[in-house]
Amino acid sequence: MSSGVAAILVSSLAFSVMTLLVKLAGERIPSQEIVLARSLVSAAVSYALLRRANIPPWGHDRRGLWLRGLTGYAALSCVYAAVTHLPLADATVIHYLNPTFTALLAGVFLGEAIGRTTIVATVLCLAGVVLVARPEALFGAGAGALDPLWVAVAVAGALGSALAYVVVRRLAQTEHPLVIVFYFPLVNIPAALPLVVRDFVWPQGIDWVWLLGVGLATQVGQMGLTAGLVALPAGQATSLSYLQVVFAALFGIFVFDEWPDTLG
Protein backbone atom coordinates (compact mmCIF):
# COMPACT_ATOMS: atom_id res chain seq x y z
CA MET A 1 0.00 0.00 0.00
CA SER A 2 2.73 2.49 0.98
CA SER A 3 4.71 1.75 -2.19
CA GLY A 4 1.57 2.34 -4.27
CA VAL A 5 0.98 5.71 -2.59
CA ALA A 6 4.61 6.73 -3.13
CA ALA A 7 4.39 5.73 -6.80
CA ILE A 8 1.27 7.87 -7.33
CA LEU A 9 2.87 10.90 -5.63
CA VAL A 10 5.98 10.63 -7.83
CA SER A 11 3.68 10.24 -10.82
CA SER A 12 1.77 13.41 -9.89
CA LEU A 13 4.94 15.49 -9.76
CA ALA A 14 6.18 14.06 -13.05
CA PHE A 15 2.87 14.70 -14.81
CA SER A 16 2.75 18.27 -13.51
CA VAL A 17 6.21 18.88 -14.99
CA MET A 18 4.97 17.29 -18.21
CA THR A 19 2.00 19.69 -18.48
CA LEU A 20 4.30 22.63 -17.82
CA LEU A 21 6.59 21.55 -20.66
CA VAL A 22 3.63 20.82 -22.96
CA LYS A 23 2.38 24.38 -22.47
CA LEU A 24 5.85 25.79 -23.13
CA ALA A 25 6.31 23.66 -26.26
CA GLY A 26 2.74 24.38 -27.39
CA GLU A 27 3.53 28.06 -27.83
CA ARG A 28 5.06 27.08 -31.19
CA ILE A 29 4.62 23.31 -31.75
CA PRO A 30 1.22 21.71 -32.66
CA SER A 31 -0.19 19.44 -29.96
CA GLN A 32 -0.11 16.27 -32.10
CA GLU A 33 3.59 16.83 -32.75
CA ILE A 34 4.12 16.99 -28.99
CA VAL A 35 2.17 13.72 -28.64
CA LEU A 36 4.45 12.12 -31.24
CA ALA A 37 7.66 13.41 -29.66
CA ARG A 38 6.56 12.23 -26.23
CA SER A 39 5.67 8.81 -27.65
CA LEU A 40 9.01 8.36 -29.46
CA VAL A 41 10.93 9.03 -26.24
CA SER A 42 8.66 6.79 -24.20
CA ALA A 43 8.84 3.94 -26.73
CA ALA A 44 12.64 4.00 -26.75
CA VAL A 45 12.93 4.13 -22.94
CA SER A 46 10.24 1.48 -22.39
CA TYR A 47 11.79 -0.94 -24.88
CA ALA A 48 15.25 -0.47 -23.36
CA LEU A 49 13.86 -1.21 -19.88
CA LEU A 50 12.06 -4.30 -21.15
CA ARG A 51 15.23 -5.59 -22.79
CA ARG A 52 17.24 -4.90 -19.65
CA ALA A 53 14.72 -6.79 -17.53
CA ASN A 54 14.52 -9.60 -20.13
CA ILE A 55 10.73 -9.25 -20.34
CA PRO A 56 8.95 -10.11 -23.64
CA PRO A 57 7.42 -6.82 -24.85
CA TRP A 58 4.24 -8.10 -26.53
CA GLY A 59 2.28 -9.26 -23.48
CA HIS A 60 -0.55 -11.78 -23.18
CA ASP A 61 -3.83 -9.85 -23.52
CA ARG A 62 -2.97 -8.00 -26.72
CA ARG A 63 -6.52 -6.87 -27.36
CA GLY A 64 -6.61 -5.24 -23.93
CA LEU A 65 -3.15 -3.73 -24.44
CA TRP A 66 -4.15 -2.18 -27.77
CA LEU A 67 -7.33 -0.86 -26.13
CA ARG A 68 -5.21 0.72 -23.41
CA GLY A 69 -3.11 2.36 -26.13
CA LEU A 70 -6.12 3.70 -28.04
CA THR A 71 -7.90 5.10 -24.99
CA GLY A 72 -4.61 6.60 -23.83
CA TYR A 73 -4.00 8.21 -27.23
CA ALA A 74 -7.45 9.78 -27.28
CA ALA A 75 -7.01 11.09 -23.74
CA LEU A 76 -3.50 12.38 -24.35
CA SER A 77 -4.53 14.21 -27.51
CA CYS A 78 -7.36 15.97 -25.69
CA VAL A 79 -5.24 16.82 -22.65
CA TYR A 80 -2.36 18.29 -24.68
CA ALA A 81 -4.75 20.33 -26.83
CA ALA A 82 -6.55 21.66 -23.74
CA VAL A 83 -3.30 22.54 -21.95
CA THR A 84 -2.10 24.60 -24.92
CA HIS A 85 -5.39 26.57 -25.11
CA LEU A 86 -6.41 27.00 -21.45
CA PRO A 87 -4.64 28.35 -18.35
CA LEU A 88 -2.47 25.57 -16.93
CA ALA A 89 -4.21 25.28 -13.55
CA ASP A 90 -7.70 25.40 -15.10
CA ALA A 91 -6.88 22.69 -17.65
CA THR A 92 -5.44 20.52 -14.88
CA VAL A 93 -8.46 21.00 -12.60
CA ILE A 94 -10.86 20.01 -15.38
CA HIS A 95 -8.73 17.02 -16.27
CA TYR A 96 -8.97 15.89 -12.66
CA LEU A 97 -12.53 14.88 -13.19
CA ASN A 98 -10.83 11.61 -14.14
CA PRO A 99 -10.61 10.14 -10.59
CA THR A 100 -14.38 10.36 -10.18
CA PHE A 101 -14.93 9.01 -13.70
CA THR A 102 -12.43 6.24 -12.89
CA ALA A 103 -14.22 5.26 -9.70
CA LEU A 104 -17.56 5.11 -11.50
CA LEU A 105 -16.21 3.15 -14.47
CA ALA A 106 -14.28 0.79 -12.18
CA GLY A 107 -17.53 0.07 -10.38
CA VAL A 108 -19.28 -0.73 -13.66
CA PHE A 109 -16.53 -2.73 -15.39
CA LEU A 110 -14.36 -4.07 -12.55
CA GLY A 111 -16.94 -4.55 -9.82
CA GLU A 112 -15.18 -2.14 -7.42
CA ALA A 113 -17.53 -0.65 -4.82
CA ILE A 114 -19.25 2.65 -5.64
CA GLY A 115 -20.13 4.17 -2.29
CA ARG A 116 -22.14 7.22 -1.32
CA THR A 117 -18.87 9.11 -0.92
CA THR A 118 -17.99 8.50 -4.57
CA ILE A 119 -21.34 9.83 -5.73
CA VAL A 120 -21.02 12.95 -3.56
CA ALA A 121 -17.47 13.48 -4.81
CA THR A 122 -18.67 13.21 -8.41
CA VAL A 123 -21.28 15.91 -7.89
CA LEU A 124 -18.76 18.19 -6.13
CA CYS A 125 -16.19 17.71 -8.90
CA LEU A 126 -18.73 18.60 -11.57
CA ALA A 127 -19.68 21.69 -9.59
CA GLY A 128 -15.99 22.58 -9.36
CA VAL A 129 -15.61 22.35 -13.13
CA VAL A 130 -18.57 24.70 -13.56
CA LEU A 131 -16.88 27.21 -11.24
CA VAL A 132 -13.64 26.95 -13.21
CA ALA A 133 -15.30 27.16 -16.65
CA ARG A 134 -17.68 29.97 -15.60
CA PRO A 135 -20.20 29.55 -18.46
CA GLU A 136 -21.81 32.85 -19.48
CA ALA A 137 -25.29 31.35 -19.19
CA LEU A 138 -24.78 31.02 -15.42
CA PHE A 139 -22.23 33.72 -14.56
CA GLY A 140 -22.89 36.44 -17.14
CA ALA A 141 -20.69 37.88 -19.88
CA GLY A 142 -18.22 39.55 -17.50
CA ALA A 143 -17.23 36.45 -15.56
CA GLY A 144 -14.19 35.61 -17.68
CA ALA A 145 -15.61 32.36 -19.05
CA LEU A 146 -13.25 29.82 -20.58
CA ASP A 147 -13.73 28.82 -24.20
CA PRO A 148 -16.44 26.11 -24.02
CA LEU A 149 -14.84 24.16 -26.89
CA TRP A 150 -11.57 23.65 -24.99
CA VAL A 151 -13.43 22.97 -21.75
CA ALA A 152 -15.27 20.18 -23.57
CA VAL A 153 -11.96 18.87 -24.95
CA ALA A 154 -10.50 18.84 -21.43
CA VAL A 155 -13.54 16.93 -20.09
CA ALA A 156 -13.20 14.43 -22.95
CA GLY A 157 -9.55 13.99 -21.98
CA ALA A 158 -10.57 13.26 -18.39
CA LEU A 159 -13.07 10.62 -19.54
CA GLY A 160 -10.49 9.06 -21.88
CA SER A 161 -7.96 8.93 -19.05
CA ALA A 162 -10.49 7.23 -16.79
CA LEU A 163 -11.18 4.59 -19.43
CA ALA A 164 -7.44 4.02 -19.85
CA TYR A 165 -6.94 3.68 -16.08
CA VAL A 166 -9.70 1.09 -15.80
CA VAL A 167 -8.13 -0.91 -18.64
CA VAL A 168 -4.73 -0.68 -16.91
CA ARG A 169 -6.27 -1.95 -13.67
CA ARG A 170 -7.73 -4.91 -15.56
CA LEU A 171 -4.47 -5.62 -17.42
CA ALA A 172 -2.52 -5.58 -14.15
CA GLN A 173 -3.85 -9.08 -13.48
CA THR A 174 -1.91 -10.56 -16.42
CA GLU A 175 0.67 -8.03 -17.66
CA HIS A 176 3.94 -6.61 -16.37
CA PRO A 177 3.72 -2.81 -15.78
CA LEU A 178 6.52 -2.16 -18.30
CA VAL A 179 4.56 -3.99 -21.00
CA ILE A 180 1.47 -1.89 -20.28
CA VAL A 181 3.54 1.31 -20.47
CA PHE A 182 5.21 0.17 -23.72
CA TYR A 183 1.90 -0.28 -25.55
CA PHE A 184 0.94 3.34 -24.92
CA PRO A 185 3.53 4.87 -27.30
CA LEU A 186 3.29 1.81 -29.57
CA VAL A 187 -0.26 2.92 -30.45
CA ASN A 188 0.34 6.67 -30.20
CA ILE A 189 3.09 6.82 -32.83
CA PRO A 190 1.11 5.48 -35.84
CA ALA A 191 -2.03 7.29 -34.66
CA ALA A 192 -0.36 10.72 -34.40
CA LEU A 193 1.97 10.48 -37.41
CA PRO A 194 -0.56 11.33 -40.19
CA LEU A 195 -1.71 14.46 -38.32
CA VAL A 196 1.88 15.53 -37.67
CA VAL A 197 2.86 15.19 -41.34
CA ARG A 198 -0.08 17.39 -42.33
CA ASP A 199 0.85 20.22 -39.94
CA PHE A 200 4.56 19.76 -39.18
CA VAL A 201 6.60 22.53 -37.51
CA TRP A 202 10.35 21.91 -37.27
CA PRO A 203 11.49 22.39 -33.63
CA GLN A 204 14.11 25.03 -33.02
CA GLY A 205 16.50 25.69 -30.13
CA ILE A 206 14.76 25.35 -26.79
CA ASP A 207 11.85 23.46 -28.42
CA TRP A 208 14.02 20.32 -28.42
CA VAL A 209 14.53 20.63 -24.65
CA TRP A 210 10.78 20.99 -24.03
CA LEU A 211 9.93 18.00 -26.25
CA LEU A 212 12.58 15.73 -24.73
CA GLY A 213 11.48 16.81 -21.25
CA VAL A 214 7.85 16.01 -22.08
CA GLY A 215 8.86 12.49 -23.08
CA LEU A 216 11.03 11.83 -20.04
CA ALA A 217 8.57 13.34 -17.53
CA THR A 218 5.70 11.38 -19.05
CA GLN A 219 7.69 8.16 -18.89
CA VAL A 220 8.29 8.66 -15.16
CA GLY A 221 4.64 9.59 -14.67
CA GLN A 222 3.35 6.57 -16.60
CA MET A 223 5.56 4.13 -14.74
CA GLY A 224 4.57 5.59 -11.37
CA LEU A 225 0.89 5.64 -12.25
CA THR A 226 0.93 2.08 -13.58
CA ALA A 227 2.73 0.84 -10.46
CA GLY A 228 0.19 2.67 -8.30
CA LEU A 229 -2.76 1.19 -10.20
CA VAL A 230 -1.29 -2.28 -9.75
CA ALA A 231 -0.99 -1.79 -5.98
CA LEU A 232 -4.16 0.21 -5.24
CA PRO A 233 -7.85 0.23 -6.26
CA ALA A 234 -8.31 2.38 -9.38
CA GLY A 235 -10.44 5.06 -7.74
CA GLN A 236 -8.13 5.41 -4.73
CA ALA A 237 -4.99 5.54 -6.86
CA THR A 238 -6.22 8.29 -9.14
CA SER A 239 -7.71 10.35 -6.30
CA LEU A 240 -4.24 10.58 -4.71
CA SER A 241 -2.95 12.21 -7.88
CA TYR A 242 -4.94 15.40 -7.15
CA LEU A 243 -1.66 16.79 -5.86
CA GLN A 244 -0.91 17.57 -9.50
CA VAL A 245 -3.47 20.39 -9.31
CA VAL A 246 -1.38 22.11 -6.64
CA PHE A 247 1.79 21.77 -8.71
CA ALA A 248 0.00 23.06 -11.82
CA ALA A 249 -1.32 26.11 -9.95
CA LEU A 250 2.19 26.94 -8.71
CA PHE A 251 3.70 26.51 -12.18
CA GLY A 252 0.93 28.66 -13.65
CA ILE A 253 1.65 31.46 -11.19
CA PHE A 254 5.43 31.46 -11.32
CA VAL A 255 6.01 30.58 -14.99
CA PHE A 256 3.00 32.01 -16.85
CA ASP A 257 1.72 34.61 -14.33
CA GLU A 258 -1.68 32.86 -14.34
CA TRP A 259 -3.15 33.79 -10.98
CA PRO A 260 -6.34 31.92 -9.99
CA ASP A 261 -9.33 34.06 -9.18
CA THR A 262 -11.80 33.53 -6.34
CA LEU A 263 -13.85 31.03 -8.35
CA GLY A 264 -11.04 29.12 -10.09
Image (cartoon, rainbow, N blue to C red):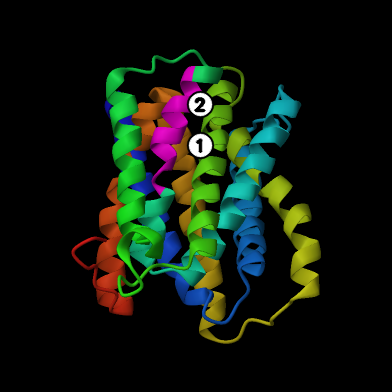
Quarter of the view holding residue 202: bottom right
Give the magenta-colored segment's residue range.
96-107
Which residue shows up at 44% across the image and 15% down it? 112
The answer to whether 109 is drawn above or below residue 59 in the figure is: above
Q: Which mark is residue 162?
A: 1
Q: Which mark is residue 128?
A: none
Which residue shows up at 33% across the image and 42% down it? 125
**Label 1 to label 2, Cα distance in Å?**
7 Å
Q: Mark 1 or 2 closer to N-term? A: 2
Q: Secondary structure at mark 1?
A: helix
The answer to whether 133 is drawn above or below residue 156 in the figure is: below
Quarter of the view holding residue 195: bottom right
Q: Which mark is residue 105?
A: 2
Q: Position of residue 14 (x, y in %)?
A: 39, 54
Quarter of the view holding residue 54: top right
Name the residue at the bottom extreme.
Answer: 205
Q: Position of residue 123 (x, y in %)?
A: 33, 36
Mark 1 Cα-neighbour bin, 10 Å: few <14, some 14–19, many ≥20: many
Tags 1 and 2 touching, CB below 8 Å? yes
Residue 112 in view, yes or no: yes
Query: Which corner quadrant holds the N terminus?
Result: top left
Report whether 134 appears left or right of 31: left
Report whether 195 appears left or right of 90: right
The foreground one among 204 and 133 is 133
Query: Which corner quadrant holds the C terminus?
Result: bottom left
Going by the numbered disc 1, the residue's amino acid type is: Ala
